[in-house]
Amino acid sequence: MKGALAVCWRDIQKFLGQPVLMVSTIVGPFLTLILLGSAFGGAITHAPIAIVQESYGPYSSNFIGILQNEQTCQFGGIECQNSFQLTNVPDLDTAQQMLHAGLVKAIVYLPLGFDDALAANSKVTVTVTLDNTDPLSAAAIGPEVAQAGQQLSSLVQTSAAYNSSMTFDLENAYRNVLYIEFMAPGTFVQAIMFVSIIAGGVQLVVDKERGIIEGYLVTPLKKYEIVVGVLLSGVFKALFSAVTVFFLAVAVAGVRPMSIFPNPNASEITLTMVTLFLTSLGLIAMMTAYAVRSTSADLYRVTCFPINLILYYTSGAIYPLKGMPTWMQEISIINPETYSIDALRLLMYKGAGLQAVIGDFTFLAIFTGLMLILAIVAFRRGI
Amino acid sequence: MNLAVETFGITKRFGDFTAVDHLNLKIKHEVFGLLGPNGAGKTTLQRMLVTVLTPTEGTATVAGADILREADKVRERIGVVTQASTLDVELTALQNMNLYGMYYGIPRKERLEKINELLKVVGLADRAKIRVAGYSGGMKRRLEIVRALVSDPRILFLDEPTTGLDPQARAAVLEYVQRIHKDHGITLVITTHYLDEAENLCDRLAIVDHGKIVAEGTPTELKRKISGGDIVEADFSSLPDNALKALEKADFVLGVKKRDGGLTILVKNGAEAVPKIVSLIDSNGGKLRTITLRELTLDDVFLEVTGRSLRE
């Protein structure tokens, strides 16, 4: 039994002697609490909505006013924010294009004769088209718009003492997208991130520690050849992982991307691959730069854990960004995973094409370029 | 190209610490040993010569090319076997060697022929397709050494090539290293702290300490630096002062050094000196426990020039 105590004491001493490892065991779970807790289940606010107004009058402007001032509250009504962020769009076609490109989450259509109908107390239908490829946002927006309608009705009632006959037609713009499908793109990016951390980074740190990199340097290999080789192999491994998870998601999890269903579509498949490629190259370059500058494999591993958590949870991978606190939304703006997940969703569930994802591609390309420069500079100095 | 390596006041400082201090060295086409205790600067010197470290001052030519201005040429002409293994143990011997040949841009056909030939020479041909993880320490070392020969280097740098090997594996590696020099005509630069290895293997040696060369020459030349012939090691149960003084004054004794528990005595002729020492101690009231006679070794030279023993 004394032996067991000695073994135990050794482990504890080693644990206490490595403050970074100690802190990481606390930081990891704590970050999970803050990030996952804040990311998931928040009320959707500032949801971008297109208003197509064909009727102008007191009722329609009143209705828009109600929508504009609609508040969504959390923490027992302490923190209230605007539910919607309205954009006036001239016609339904433009609005639908915006919805398709992911610029708005819903279209509220006030048809010609809206005001007249309400004034005359005859029946009127307001069409609300929802982007249900984001099922959580859609589920929140529909009822809230209807609630605004009820408020208007009650105003109409008090002024005219009649029962308003306004009804809402909630339309899904797309086929029913399951939550598991909404979540799937995040897992492809996660696969890329894991490869970047393990194969791209840890292996490099270990190779550095073992002197393999120095072994490279006494051969005629140029430093840039080493960087390019490391990055290429990383991209290969990351793509292999991501594509495998993609097909597993299709085969096992019931994910039905438009690039494959109902018929395989070459241009959608190509664009999906471009997204995965840019994401892989960018993340591999980022983790390579970090790994080259790391002094110990242990330190690298424990710091990668929180980096991965932050990037994953603030990317909108598991919940709509509009439902997250401001600070998380701010991180999401500079988070490359945000853009690749957005692009993947647009391509997979809307078949949205190059035009819709060009913004995401631009960000990813700039990010990847910066990370490549960083990796090359790190290699020059650190090796 | 008369010299394999020539350094010109080569110096490396790490902050305030000078690891290699204005060192001048000439290595011919021979087996050359760099000898020194840990931290003496021999590995730093070697890392500069193989272009991994940039000197703070001075420069060197290696295989006819300048290490600063023509590092690429140096790398093409040398092979390096580092102290820590850089083999990929997840890969087979063949894969390891093939990759190495690719780094040097050797055409595939030529590369594979060369690899097969080398694996045969080192006795690993029948295991070429086994993962290196299953190799013994000695086999790994041999593989690592032949791997460096794929590129036909003019100079092969070996850093502590037998450290961590059992005596049998060590002998096999050493035998092979000797053959590389004889059969392939490759200059070898070996750092080591095994004196017997240096003595048997090297044509010439340099002893490095505090970043400088403190002695240089063939093993025989180095040993001749200590005038005289043999060493007597004596341990005592008791050694009165007058016995020690008598010993120091005796005409057959060239020098006496105290060490833990006894004395190391340098004498002209060991066979004659031993009985004389015994009777001299006896007559002065001292008591011997053991007395051994041995030939002068490089360790004695080492002790003389650095004030330290390598075996400590």
Image (spheres, coloured by chain):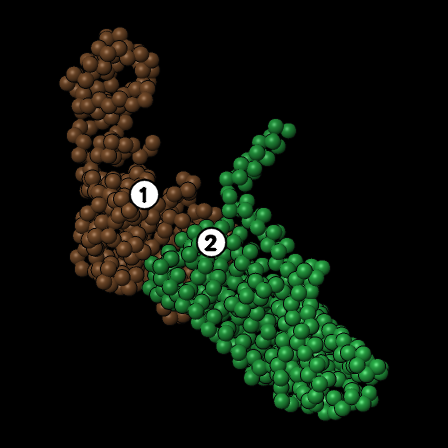
Chain colours: A green, B brown
- Identify the residue at horizontal 20%, vertical 14% (top origin): B245
> Quick check: can you spot residue A247?
no
Q: On the rendered structure, is B285 left or right of A329?
A: left
Q: Is residue B94 above or below residue B297?
A: below
> Quick check: can you spot residue B304?
yes
User: Could you say which quadrant of the image residue A35 lies in?
Assistant: bottom right
Q: Which secondary structure lies at badge 2?
A: helix
**Residue carrying label 1:** B192
- x and y percent of residue A196 in the render? 52, 63
**Numbered marks: total:** 2
Numbered disc in front, either 1 or 2? 2
- Identify the residue at horizontal 82%, vertical 89% (top origin): A122
| Neighbourhood count class around disc 2 (C-alpha, 10 Å): few under 14, some 14–19, many 20 upward | some
Q: On the rendered structure, is A211 left or right of A186?
A: left
- Image quarter where the N terminus of chain B lies is bottom left
Residue type for callout 2: Val
- Identify the residue at horizontal 30%, vertical 54% (top origin): B53
| Neighbourhood count class around disc 1 (C-alpha, 10 Å): few under 14, some 14–19, many 20 upward | many
The answer to whether the residue labelled 1 contacts the one labelled 2, judged by CB atoms less than 8 Å apart, is: no
- x and y percent of residue A269 in the render? 60, 80
**Residue carrying label 2:** A206
Q: On the rendered structure, is B123 left or right of B263?
A: right
Q: On the rendered structure, is A211 left or right of A13?
A: left
Using the image, name the chain to which the residue with label 1 belongs: B
Q: CA distance from mark 1 to mark 2?
A: 26 Å
- Using the rendered image, report if marks 1 and 2 lie on a common chain: no
Residue type for callout 1: Thr
